[in-house]
Amino acid sequence: MRCEGKTCDGFSAVFRERNGGFFKLKEVYVMAAVVDKDTCVGCEACVSACPVEAISMVDGKAEVNDACVDCGACVSACPVEAISL
């Protein structure tokens, strides 16, 4: 877990974890991607790259919501490196 041993500024989310052929629920802490609004050019590449639809455009800039699972797909897709984890 990314926040282990320290206070996490992320939000709590529930994910399914594979365990011996059965699924159990596990609470983990996830830190959402951050968009630098000054660098974002509004190309929407991150919107289409996000597998959980956690990014929308607000006033021509990308905005990440609480559905973000910190996968990094948006970071890779951004042509101007406006998104970080």
Image (cartoon, helix red, strand yellow):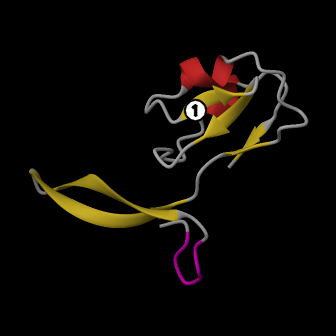
In the rendered image, residue 4 lying in the magenta stretch gets the answer: yes
What residue sits 68% from the left and 18% below the top? 44
Does the rendering let one see residue 31? yes
Residue behind mark 1: 55
In terms of secondary structure, where does tag 1 sit? strand
Query: Residue 39: where, in percent of width, then height?
Result: 89, 33
Q: Front-most of 2 and 19?
A: 2
Q: Which residue does the image show at 64% across and 46% down from the upper left?
A: 33
Residue range highlighted in magenta: 3-8
Looking at the image, the residue that sits furthest to the right is: 38
Residue 80 falls left or right of residue 31: right
Q: Is residue 24 magenta?
A: no
Residue drawn at the location 70% of the way across and 31% of the way down: 62
In the image, 39: left or right of 29? right
> Is residue 62 placed above or below 7 in the rendered structure?
above
Image position of 63 with respect to 6: above or below: above
Answer with left or right where residue 52 lies relative to residue 79: left
Residue 54 in percent (x, y) is at: 51, 36
Magenta: predominant secondary structure element? loop
